[in-house]
Amino acid sequence: MALFFFNNLLGSIISGLLSSAKSSSLFLSSCFSSSTELPFNADIPIISSNEIIFSGRISSDVKQFTVMAAKNLKSNSLFGWNCLDECRYNCMWRTVKGFEQRGYDIPKFHGKWPFERFFGMQEPGSTLASFLNLAAHVRMHMVYMKKFPLDDVDNMVLFWHLFAVVCMNAWAWSTLFHMRDCPFTEFMDYACALSMVMIMYIAAVIRVFKKRRTLTTSIVVLSALVFAQHLVYLYTARVDYHYNMMLNLFFGVSGSAIWLCWGVAQWVSGRRYAWRVVAFVLVSAAALSLELLDFPPYFYVWDAHALWHLATVPLPFLFYRFVIDDLQYTRRGEDTKPDFKTA
């Protein structure tokens, strides 16, 4: 009788251990993005060479994993990382090491490359680059305010102040989003990024076609309605990232085309300062090409997106200088000819 009881107890313990090992494997497998592709017949590196279960005992590797996760959870509390987040993060890096050991390409996890956190920041490269863009806009807005203070009643002067506020707000949310990706920061980043793209498009329309009030008013109102509709879409629907990107590209390319054509025409006609807006558009396009690339981050910090943000840091210095020169030019009373002739 005692032997029968002992055998049942031993069987229950072994079954429990096997069930635990299976559950651990399933949990680690869930870290993979659904788009991850593995080599045919490849061994999935779910568990490293230090096995989770060895001779019925929990290995020292798992104990180290647990202690590390607890330590990170305590140090990253500022950014709201919880226990599940830390488990996913540590699981991700165990998987990355497994891929590296087997010579496989590094996969994405839930659509994102693996990044090393820095003081709890999720994507340190993009965070730094976004902050530098914010600092550049703040600096150039201060320069602009010295030339054209807020008490100036000129409509274009006030518009460029609004332009600066929209851009600074967008880069502030970009910084926060890359620090900590959550549904709210993602919504604000996408919404504010589109606001910056659209304000640049509206700026081109207002500046180039400013003497055609009906046309500019219609375009501005229509653009505002599109933006409001997209905000509702981002907030209430499952985001179609391709659609969101296409909308940004449409307004971005449209605004850039207007600025480029107008800038070249003004430079040829003798407004030498217009070279700045031409250079701004060309450098912006060159920087955007980085976003079209997609490669694992260097040092697990700098991916294509982070490098794109880094490449845009000098652009505010070009554009705000152009704005200042253009306002000074128009105030001298030299802007009497229409920007584009109508048929």
Image (spheres, rainbow, N blue to C red):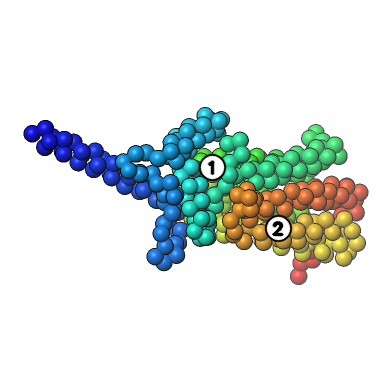
Residue situated furthest bottom in the rendering: 343
Q: Residue at x 43, y 54 (%)?
A: 45
Compare residues 299 and 111 and report the one nearer the observer: 299
Residue situated furthest left in the rendering: 1
Q: Residue at x 60, y 49 (%)?
A: 300
Q: Position of residue 142 (x, y in %)?
A: 80, 37
Amino acid identity at mark 2 = Ala
Q: CA distance from mark 2 to mark 1?
A: 24 Å
Q: Position of residue 275 (x, y in %)?
A: 84, 59
Q: Which mark is residue 287?
A: 2
Q: Residue at x 54, y 49 (%)?
A: 114
Q: Position of residue 42 (x, y in %)?
A: 42, 62
Q: Residue at x 57, y 59 (%)?
A: 246
Compare residues 235 and 109 and report the one nearer the observer: 109
Name above or below for residue 37 compared with residue 316.
Answer: below
In the figure, is residue 224 to the left or right of 85? right
Residue at the spot of label 1: 181
Name above or below for residue 244 compared with residue 130.
Answer: below
> Callout 2: helix, strand or loop?
helix
Q: Which mark is residue 121?
A: none
